[in-house]
Image (cartoon, rainbow, N blue to C red):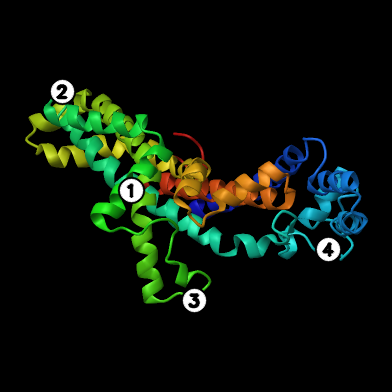
Amino acid sequence: MRLLGYAAYKLLSMLVTLLVVSVLVFTIINLPPGDYLSNQIMELQATGQQAGIAKAEFLRAEYSLDQPLWRQYLIWVGFAPGPNGFYGLLQGNFGWSFEFDQPVADIVGETLWLTVLVNVAAILFVYVVALPLGVLAAARARSWVDYSTALVGYLGLATPNFLLALVLFYYGHKYLDLPIGGLMAPEFVGEAMSFEKLRSILLHLIIPTFVVGTAGAASMMQRLRANMLDELSKPYVETALAKGMRERKMLMKYPLRVSLNPFIADIGTLLPAMISGSVLVSVVLGLQTIGPALLTALKTQDQFLAAFILMFVALLTLIGTLISDMLLAMLDPRIRIGGPRK
């Protein structure tokens, strides 16, 4: 029951945080002077295109861009009625993209789950690579194993993702016959999920997963090595070995378990950090993720598209934080959920 109460508290705080984030996102996006339609109207006035001006003015009124900023926000979220009544984010209306001239939902529909798929695959890659290499480097400190993993880690941190993407883009196709660009073959775009489409997605995921996850794996490996070395220097390790406990069992039962806490806590920030950091990689590899759409929306001040994508990333951050908090509460007996301290 105490765990359920803690989960309810975290969910409530997550909703409050999401509300505050929505205010900040909407305010920051509207800080630059003008908006997409205002800029378009000025261009049309300069060229004398009256029909285009009338359409732009209609869209300004239709999407309440002629209202004060505070009212625009309330209408966008769905707290206040607009020209079409209560029809905002809370009612499932993500807004209209003026740059692409279609609903935001149509633009981000398939890209949302593809974005999550790419970055979840990258996170799995990070943990699968970083955990064993970090433990191995710590257990064999100042040996050729330690120096080799350190070299791999430094190369991963020093190599720009977009450069690594270009290199793997070329050599992966030349020598391994891996598909070039995108997250699926063109014939599967817009089609229902099938075995062939899933196979195509998995093949296209190989290079993006490696590129997006390399820097994160290198950083986590170095942190785990440092944490493990700190734990291995403590007296309880020598005591356990002196009592005859096997080294492998001792490593897994004590130092590794203590060292894992920061990596469980990282779940809350790793996913959104990878999404925001993979925008350039998505452009280079031609991935159908939200990265290129976000870049275009920010450049053109397409406020509804940019605001929704940023809210989506914020939601992922909060969900990841909730998951990491719950895992820490369940796995670490030193963490108390409520109740008096002993």
CA–CA distance between discs 3 and 1? 30 Å
Q: Which residue is mark 4?
A: 86
User: On the picture, is 298 further left or further right than 159?
Assistant: right
The residue at 33%/46% (across/down) is 168
Residue 170 circle label: 1
Q: Residue 65 versus residue 93: which sits nearer the camera?
A: 65
- N-terminal of the pair, mark 2 or mark 1, is 2
Marks 3 and 2: which is nearer the front?
A: 3
Q: Is mark 3 in CB contact (under 8 Å) with mark 2?
A: no
Kind of residue indicated by mark 4? Phe
> Dot 3 surroundings within 10 Å: few (below 14), some, or many (20 or more)?
few
Regarding mark 4 in the picture, which secondary structure is present there?
loop
CA–CA distance between discs 3 and 2? 53 Å
Residue 142 circle label: 2
Regarding mark 2 in the picture, which secondary structure is present there?
loop
Name the image quarter holding the C terminus.
top left
CA–CA distance between discs 2 and 1? 36 Å
> Dot 2 surroundings within 10 Å: few (below 14), some, or many (20 or more)?
few
The residue at 54%/60% (across/down) is 111
